[in-house]
Amino acid sequence: MGYVKNRNMLLSHGNIRLRRIALDIAEHALAKADPYPAVKALVRLRGDTLDVGEIRLDLKKQGRIFLLGAGKATYPIAMALEEILGERIEDGVIICKYGQEGTLSRARLYLSSHPIPDEAGFLAATEALALARETRPGDIVFAGVTGGSSALMPYPVDGITLDEKKLVNRMLLTCGANIIEINAVRKHLSQIKGGWLAKNIHCQAHLINLTVSDVIGDPLDYITCPTVPDTSSFDDARRTFSKYGLWEKAPSSVSRYLLAGVPSLETPKDLSDHKIDNFIIVPGTAACEGAAEKARESDLDTMILSTMLEGESREVGGTFASIAKEIVLNHRPLTPPCVVIGGGETTVTVAGESGQGGPNQEFSLGAALRIDGVGDVVIVGLDSDGTDGPTDIAGGIADDRTVSRAAALGIDIFAALNGHDVTPVLMKLEDAIVTGNTGTNVNDLKLMLVMPEEQ
């Protein structure tokens, strides 16, 4: 499957030889993170016997089957389950991002906004909660909650409006907080996240979570947080607000609610009275591992540097560029031809007004500034879901000729990074990677390829 829609344009300039190899590796990485084949491998139906991994269910002794899910990797999960279970599915509510239009025959498909929630998402969340409350003993509920569900399925606590929740989301996404810190707040402002959706499913129903991880370390309560017990607390949410100076910036209703948070308002910490089985069908490291597989098949010296990258995106890009220089000059830690792979969730801290961009775009241009003329080097930053930040592009590609090309076009990359307005730069350079919705959502992929100049 060809994920990169503008591949020909990306290969029309710059270091074409290296770009082609890098894009091949990136596309293979995305294919390895596809949840559809993962569901087909895990869930098997033979007559009235349903196997989910090592779990065996006799459907003659079970109740109805429901689907619940929200997220950027949820649609392929629902599609695979419908193909496997067909008319055995009673009903379902699946919430996806605008642009992920598709067809489901047994579940109701809703579309809503990401990364900032909207009214459509709230209405869909209402339907999801209503369906959860309809469950009875013996029912089976397949939950496919994946990354992006926090925005796609908003249901704020009483006393906080959806508009106030939107404002808090914007603040959290631009303050430099990581996803653990962000979700500690979001879970404590929600009636559906932090285990509340599971709490509304009948305790004698069987909840089966099939999820895709987009969080470093694959912590369940941060990747499928509505359907498992929550490990975070009001104290964690308050620490995030204090660490990033958000108390005075947030709506007063939000600050009051978090400050007044008491044990009786806490998210569910124990769901041992519910029957829940959890399957991470695609781990957060899947894209990195897929990239490494393809690179080794191509006889490239390969290193996964880290799958836990965090920090300011442009600076992480600069670090990759420094490693490229070390490889070119000193042949360490690898010898060209080679690939260095990284994964994780880098961030962008925005103070005041900003333009268009995203962390993977800033990563690629941050790297470009430091690999100018270094040698045969190409660096890619890619958001696996196809939408980097609040943009319609997946990320960016840069090589050892990017800065000189930008100068010839009168483009100031440094100024664009300082103003967090990098999308226009990548578009003018024809270096913005466009994939559309990929159907998956794992950790971001950072990819660097270095070749000997004589090859």
Image (cartoon, grey):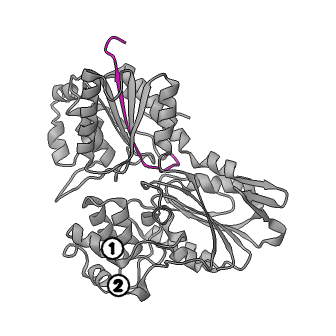
- Disc 2 is placed on an element classified as loop
How far apart in space, not on screen, are marks 2 and 1 (Cα)? 10 Å
Residue 23 locus on image (x, y percent): 43, 30
Q: Is residue 304 visible?
A: yes
Q: Nearer the viewer, residue 252 or 304?
A: 304
Q: Nearer the viewer, residue 241 or 402?
A: 241
Residue occupying image coordinates x 19% and y 75%: 248
Q: Are marks 2 and 1 in contact (CB under 8 Å)?
A: yes
Quickly name the residue at label 2: 261
Q: Is residue 129 left or right of residue 326?
A: right
Residue occupying image coordinates x 85% and y 57%: 47
Q: Which residues are magenta?
A: 438-455
Quadrant housing the C terminus: top left
Residue 335 locus on image (x, y percent): 35, 22
Q: Is residue 215 above or below residue 108?
A: above
**2 or 1: tag closer to the N-terminus:** 1
How crowded is the residue under tag 2: few (<14 C-alpha within 10 Å), some, or many (20+)?
some
**Mark number displayed over residue 271:** none
Indicate yes or no whether the magenta region holds residue 443: yes
Indicate yes or no whether the magenta region holds residue 194: no
